[in-house]
Image (spheres, helix red, strand yellow):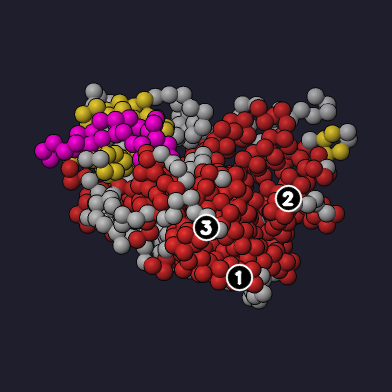
Amino acid sequence: MTKKNGSAPDDNLIEDILKGAGKSKEEVERTGQLDRGEDLVESTFDPKHRTVNSSVHKAVWSGKTPVEMFRATAQVDANAPYWEKMDQAVAIVKGHREAGTLFGEDNRVTDEVINDLAAVGYWGALIAPEYGGWGLPLSVFMPFLTRMAAEGDATVAGMASIHGCIGAVDPIEAFATDEFKAEYLPKLSDGRALSAFALTEPWAGSDLTALRTTAVLDGDDYVVNGRKLFISNVLPGRTIGLVCKIDGVTSVLIADLPNEENEHFQLDRYGIHAVQHIHNYGIVFKDFRVPARNLLDPGIGDGLTIAYHGLNRGRVALCANAAGTMRLLLKSMMPWIDFRETYGAKIGSRELVARRVADIAAKIVGADALVQWCSSLLDEGYRGELECIVAKVFAADALADTTIKALKTHGGRSFLKGHIVGDNIHDFFAPSIYEGENEMLGMAELKGLIKDHGMKFMAPFAKVKNFNPANPAHAWKVKGALIRLGFWTVGALLNRWDNQHIAGLNPRLRKHTKFALKRFRILMRQVHFTMLKHQLKLGDRQQRMIELSGDVQKTVVILATCLHASKLGDEATVLAADVLSRNLTREIVGGRQTDDDFKLNWKLAKLVSEGKFHQLDTVPAETILKPYTKEA
């Protein structure tokens, strides 16, 4: 049961746990506020699509992995008009890149590019046709971002995800009135109003309870005062979703920024290494007026409901962009390893280089699998919190590791001006902190995973100060919970692993899916007994939380990737899934690579070099810089 205007039921397990753990009143209240916000977001979804009924939650806690929920089930319309428009958008960006007109003198995407894309409707990709958009389902939009990043430009792909997923488009589509949609969505669709989401503040990163920007009602306007930081896609004349405090309640206003800076609105311009091709600035508001009718009503809860709503879209979009960028990096390596010689032999013949090629190809297939699976879940109506965190963390780590492997392979040329690695190295590492820093998201993953289990079996213990099961008085107070917990514990120990037949599975990948199904049962027991061991102090065991969360995430990636690769069926994709699953399995259980692993890396690298890894077919090749010959 929830209450209107930002409040949830008075009882809150997280607050009880923190109180029992001796945390300060401020930490208890702030953390409880965020947890209530999460509860309110959950309540906006149909019960069958909430976290407790998600694929990852069921895989760990239900006793039987719902394998079919790990398959991408989206059915796309091959005859839809938007396919041609997507081709046109990619062609526009490719043309500008080849002509050297993609970026201006300030090294940002030019207005000409933005306007050319607007002409084919690019900025309305996620907006319904009735408002002038393409109306793409996410299961089409997300792979399109991968294609745009790989064939066109990653920044242009990122601008579309900011605008459509975490900018003003999603909040308006989800929470605005029909009248407001009719006013704003057409101009967001045709490029007249590119958008951003102004959430982060100098004093508040992941702590949304620390926001200081305020809006005070004055007649027909809200008067805004405060400061925002690290806002991508922001310029005068654009539209933002502005998160602020109104009467102490977190709220979201849709604000049209003036065409020029003035005494009420200023950009805080700073130098920044990452996101170099997009406008990223701070914003300073001083008595800045926004029409009162631009306040979005979430219908339940407060602005946290709105702020949380688009995050999962943004996480999948990041994974999609990373999948395209890794294609670029791998494709850039292929001419070089065939050109560069050491001690009379091409470096492509070296085992370490082959391993790098195989590992990057494997990560590309893993990212593709997560993009297709997660976007399909979101299209079905699932919240997708646990699944989309997996996609974001995997992709950010994979892109960072791919960057390092490309850097090592290209060597000193990586640092030449005009080289893909040297020119973009900060952009390639930045996703590890975008949409939530990876380890913080890992802890969020575990918290989301254990919350329902904690409510069922741990909540009564949190009510007893310094609970000790050996104390008869304590045990009596929670005897019912202890009985239920005892029965569940016995069941968890007896339920060893799934012995399921998975239809359509490639024989090479069967052992990996079997490992994943067994691993979910092991994780069920490990998470359960970790909760029992640490009880109210679990929140302070951050290293243990990250370790458990990491194992859950890797197991999810193995299963989703094997199902994806089996569906595609080509040799290179299947081998890539095999390589990725072997690597992740070792990360979970330890051990060294075997001779079979080495042979598999060689085989996959050979397929990539022969052009049989079709994920690279349409990716442009990089020019070798400073290609000195022996004669020179």
Cα separation between marks 3 and 2:
57 Å
Instruction: Residue 584: give its label.
Output: none
Name the quadrant of the C terminus: top right
For the residues bearing labels 3 and 1, Cβ distance under 8 angstroms: no
Q: Position of residue 385 (x, y in %)?
A: 46, 56
Viewer-proximal residue among 231 and 144:
231
Q: Earlier in the sequence, mark 3 or mark 2?
A: 2
For this rendering, which residue is in front, 128 or 178?
A: 178
Q: Are marks 3 and 2 in contact (CB under 8 Å)?
A: no
Dot 2 amino acid type:
Ala
| Residues packed near mark 2 inside 10 Å, few (<14), some (14 to 19) or many (20 plus) | many
Element at label 3? loop
- Residue tagged 1: 490
Q: Residue furthest left?
A: 219
Secondary element under disc 1, as helix, strand or loop, is helix
The residue sitting at 63% across, 72% down in the picture is 495
Location of residue 413 (image quadrant): top right
Mark found first going from the N terminus, 2 or 1: 2
**Of label 3 and label 1, which has the lower sequence position?**
3
Question: Mark 3 to mark 1: distance in Å?
Answer: 22 Å
- Residue wearing tag 3: 471
- The residue sitting at 53% across, 49% down in the picture is 538
Extent of the magenta region: 201-229
* Amino acid marked by disc 3: Asn
**Quadrant where the N terminus lies?**
bottom left
Please give the label number shown on residue 358.
2
Q: Residue at x 82, y 35 (%)?
A: 341
Q: Amino acid at mark 1?
A: Val
Determine whether the residue tagged by mark 2 lies in a helix, strand or loop.
Answer: helix
